[in-house]
């Protein structure tokens, strides 16, 4: 296998345009910077993180920035686009999240077992949740009623609160900016997500946007404390060769006819950012190459182990941002997602969207609390583990620590409230002198080898002493 690049066939789900184009072949470039490599290894060990989509769209409870994009899959409450866009931009005058309390969020996330956070400093609409000097379309603008609040520089306050809880800090940043006159030039209509003018014809205007982008990322890298991850979205804003552009257009993607070479000089962005934040992990998502330090399959769990650093990003509900009508995934579902992702070598970045007043739904708090109860019993099988053969065996998933300690996590059915009296493994058998115990209980379990695996006995006393639900973990150590 080439040490520099790993190519893996993987089909992405494109949801709400969160990615650029579907890619069947992913090319991963191994990290060369030893500081980045060290931080990436640390990040891989954390396994569970919190993502938060929050912005003007949260006031209306709509689909993030996407409702102001003129693509025909998007639905709006107001049919007249010009009227809708005017009212959307006017939300800056009413955005006043008086219930904003990031310490509450950090405590809830910490208790849930989360260990890193990725916050939307700016989504595609261009509204900045930080005190940028490059635009007045920001939460600290005098137009925004929240600008007088001591917590007005929302990104800084969030990062500080989570950093105090020993979280890795990730800054989500959209490379597109639909409010910038250097990206969506007001001379022209905005038919889709792409820059709406011919970059070859107006190169100076594009260079102003490039500088604007560099300046904003530089602000985040210099004025907001330690940043561990720069999580770049809007994968269509990237360098393309003419051959790549032609290949995309031939696929007849819904927005391919407007695609251009939108080169923002990512190499310089990363170089400058790492000069200020040594070891910074950069995730130029969906853009294969040296600046996509880990991959981000969206809203899906790969079917097999992936041979590179990766993270499933997924909302807790059916919406990335706050929605008053959201349907939340059950605790059972969320824990099973976590186990399945970790057993395949990935991290789980679980998204929750605060509302316009600045808090998250009570259901989300309940889910985090329940996950936390499970993690307190079973976290040994999650943190700093790696995949191990046979990876899965029926309803059991396997993880392993560096010292060889192996965990077999039994995924209960929805209506299965008690662990079985016997767990039969057909693909895995511990070594002869292995000790097996059930996390959260006391005592050594008896087991016997079979022709192809083993049978593990769970005594009645142990079954009655179980302190977690949804999934149970067998810890296997060699004596």
Image (cartoon, rainbow, N blue to C red):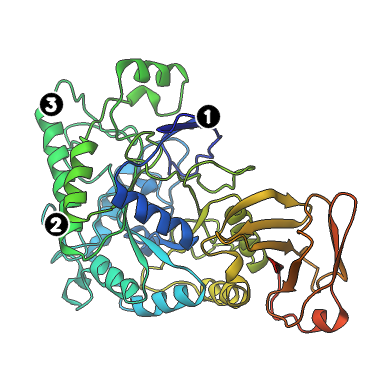
Residue under the image location 72 percent in, 51 percent down = 392
Asked if marks 2 and 1 touch (Cβ < 8 Å), the reply is no
- Report the mark closest to the observer, 1 or 3: 1
The reply to whether dot 2 and dot 3 touch (C-beta < 8 Å) is: no
Discs 2/3, front: 3
Earlier along the polypeptide chain: callout 2 or callout 3?
A: 2
Q: Where is residue 233 in the image (x, y as percent from the top left)?
A: 35, 45
Residue at the spot 33% in from the left edge and 32% down from the top edge: 191
Residue assigned mark 2 = 136
Q: Mark 3 points at which residue?
A: 203
| Mark 3, secondary structure of its residue | helix
Q: Is residue 312 above or below residue 411?
A: above
Across and down, in percent, residue 45 comes to 47, 60
Along the line of sight, the residue nearer the viewer: 17 or 343: 343
Between disc 1 and disc 3, whose residue precedes? 1
Tell me which label, 2 or 1, sits earlier in the chain.
1
Spatial CA distance of label 2 from label 3 is 24 Å
Q: Is mark 1 on a helix, strand or loop?
A: loop
Residue placed farthest to the right in the image? 451
């Amino acid at each position: 296998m080439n040490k520099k690049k790993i190519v893996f066939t993987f089909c992405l789900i494109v949801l709400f345009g969160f990615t650029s184009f579907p890619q069947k072949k992913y090319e991963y470039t191994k990290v060369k910077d030893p500081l980045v490599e060290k931080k990436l290894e640390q990040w891989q060990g954390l396994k569970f993180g919190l993502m938060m989509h929050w912005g003007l769209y949260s006031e209306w409870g709509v689909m993030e920035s996407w409702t102001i994009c003129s693509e025909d899959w998007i639905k709006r409450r107001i049919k007249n686009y010009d009227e809708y866009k005017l009212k959307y931009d006017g939300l800056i005058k009413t955005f006043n999240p008086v219930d904003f309390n990031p310490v509450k969020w950090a405590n809830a996330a910490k208790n849930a077992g989360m260990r890193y956070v990725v916050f939307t400093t700016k989504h595609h609409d261009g509204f900045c949740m930080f005190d940028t000097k490059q635009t007045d379309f920001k939460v600290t603008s005098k137009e925004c009623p929240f600008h007088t609040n001591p917590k007005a520089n929302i990104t800084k306050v969030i990062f500080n609160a989570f950093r105090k809880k020993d979280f890795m800090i990730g800054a989500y940043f959209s490379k597109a900016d639909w409010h910038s006159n250097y990206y969506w030039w007001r001379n022209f209509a905005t038919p889709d997500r792409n820059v709406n003018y011919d970059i070859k014809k107006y190169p100076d205007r594009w260079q102003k946007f490039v500088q604007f982008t560099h300046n904003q990322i530089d602000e985040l890298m210099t004025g907001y404390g330690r940043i561990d991850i720069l999580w770049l979205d809007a994968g269509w804003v990237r360098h393309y060769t003419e051959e790549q552009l032609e290949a995309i257009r031939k696929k007849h993607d819904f927005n391919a006819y407007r695609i251009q070479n939108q080169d923002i000089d990512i190499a310089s962005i990363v170089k400058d950012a790492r000069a200020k934040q040594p070891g910074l992990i950069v995730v130029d998502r969906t853009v294969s190459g040296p600046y996509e330090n880990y991959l981000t399959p969206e809203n899906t769990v790969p079917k097999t182990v992936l041979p590179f650093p990766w993270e499933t990003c997924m909302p807790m509900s059916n919406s990335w941002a706050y929605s008053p009508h959201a349907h939340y995934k059950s605790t059972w579902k969320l824990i099973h997602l976590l186990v399945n992702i970790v057993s395949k070598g990935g991290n789980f970045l679980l998204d929750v969207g605060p509302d316009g007043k600045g808090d998250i739904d009570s259901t989300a708090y309940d889910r985090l609390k329940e996950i936390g109860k499970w993690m307190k019993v079973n976290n040994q099988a999650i943190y700093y583990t790696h995949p191990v053969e046979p990876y899965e065996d029926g309803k059991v998933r396997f993880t392993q620590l560096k010292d060889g300690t192996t965990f077999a996590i039994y995924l209960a059915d929805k209506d299965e409230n008690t662990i079985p009296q016997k767990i039969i493994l057909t693909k895995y058998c511990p070594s002869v002198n292995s000790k097996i115990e059930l996390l959260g209980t006391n005592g050594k379990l008896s087991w016997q080898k079979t022709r192809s695996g083993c049978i593990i006995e769970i005594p009645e006393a142990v079954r009655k002493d179980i302190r977690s639900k949804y999934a149970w973990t067998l810890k296997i150590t060699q004596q």
